[in-house]
Image (spheres, rainbow, N blue to C red):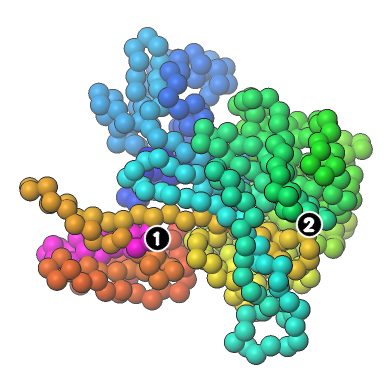
Amino acid sequence: MRWQINHYIFCDEKQTLLSEDGSSQLEPMMVELLVYFCRHPNEIISKDRLIEYVWQGRIVSDNAVTRIITKLRKVFLDDARKPNFIATFPKKGYKFIANVQPLADYKEKQPLIDIHADRSNEIIKKSNHKFLLLTTFLLIAVFCSWLLFVQEKPNSELTIDKDIKISGSIVLTTDAGNEVQPSISPDGTRISYMSITSDNQINLVIKSLKSHEKVYVQHSNDADVGPASWSPDGKEIVYLVTSVNTCQYYTRAVNGLQLEEPELIYTCNKGSYGGMSYTHDKNTVVFSENKGAGTPYELFELNLKTKIKTRLNQPSVHLAGNSQFDLHPTKNKLLISSPDEKQWVGFYSLDLDSEKLNLLFKQNAYICCGIWSHQGDRMVLMDGFPSYQLASYDLSGKEKEIIFSASEQIIRPYRHSNGKDYLYVAGRHNKDIKLVDLINGNSKTIANASVSDRLPAFSPNGKTIAYISEATGSEQIWLYDVVTEKRLKLTNFDNHSHYFDLKFSPNGQALIALDINSIFYV
């Protein structure tokens, strides 16, 4: 899972703490402690409680706890005397006082293999921190039901699978919280999704697409519920329920919006927030599971009649592991998005009957969550990260088509059950840049596009400011002349990368920009 901690991004699976100043690799116990703090912000937590839940009762001294606290403070540049992150309460314990919001992109409690991720692929959490000005909204949109089957079109017209014309998108959820992990029922009448409330509660919602009525799939008050998957006949759902100390999967009969009593089918490892999906056989589900927080995910199959669990044949496990998979629309095959040790993603096809695993293609990039197209002969995925477009690839990865362009950042795609349309989860954020005179206190705006402007860097002579802006739909380097107050777009990058740092050379004649896997010289 990922969290926004003030201006940092914390990913427990990759064990990293990311800010615009760079990335820090955390030790395993630092990760475990920080996860616990993120789940219990603004609570005074005793050392005994930390030893019980973070060190899981292992015999450790108070000094061991203090050492990890000190290391966390160091990586946050936090002053114990004037803390912004970890406050000490003598003889009582510690309180994590930073502004914490869960993120996910890509799946959060279901970890993503990308930097977006967790329950996934894909949660972007609304933050109250004014510095970030993060005003997010999550759209679950459909490539509209007006998609028309047409004859062969000119090359200039956007098409997918040669016969579907792209015509637009519509909003399916408008809750006050953030909505992720959409799944349309097989009859197309209902949508299930996870809704993240302002108090960080994760709820599973089933909504009628006709009447717009909603029902909440509820368990205990302290439990997070979701994501869910519909059975092939649309009469049941399988879904995840988690709390600090539990991880369980349930099935539940659904008649319209009427819910029957839940049935516990599997107890997963504590801290394992994977995803589960029915196969084309109602009695078999596939799910991802790890051995506890911070460990990589593997894929398993569960027979609902015998309750026998079987590990699937799958790619080698690296980083977050094999948490991302998609069932073929008609065949008993999985599409697995699996990262290598460099975080570059390979796409694999697994035949569930023969257990034959084939590598389709790899991308020398960090791109999350490929899915089968409706015909199952192509793949649909985001066009880079961050992405404002969806792309369709043939199964060799060579033939690429852009099938949709959005005005907001796309987190990941899903198939609609009608066999034509697609869903996507998307969010928008807005960061502006201001120049403040520290002597007289005056300030003026350098960049205030309706999207993100960030990473300002002064040239050595102080006359120019370089920054990253999404004003043209993708992240580009812009220049601002402090004297004339004019702006100039410097680059035309076409790789839709996300940049983490920007620096001038000592002579002011060049810039370097850092993305996930590359350094660019301009």
Q: Secondary structure at mark 2?
A: loop
Look at the image and say whether residue 451 sits in the magenta stretch.
Answer: yes
Residue visible at 57% across and 40% down? 196
Disc 1 residue type (three-letter) = Val
Q: Position of residue 435 (x, y in %)?
A: 19, 55
Choose between 214 and 510: the one closer to the eye.
214
The residue at which mark 2 appears reads as 188
Q: Position of residue 333 (x, y in %)?
A: 81, 59
Residue 318 horizontal side relative to residue 84, left or right: right
Residue 369 horizontal side relative to residue 209, left or right: left
Displayed quadrant of residue 295 = top right
Q: How many marks?
A: 2
Residue visible at 83% across and 30% down? 261
Look at the image and say whether residue 143 sits in the magenta stretch.
Answer: no
Residue extending furthest toward the left: 439
Residue visible at 79% across and 42% down? 257
Q: Earlier in the sequence, mark 2 or mark 1?
A: 2
Disc 2 residue type (three-letter) = Gly
- Asked whether residue 274 appears in the rendered view, the answer is no
Displayed quadrant of residue 218 = top right
Instruction: Decide: is 20 above or below 55.
Output: below
Choose between 24 and 85: the one closer to the eye.
85
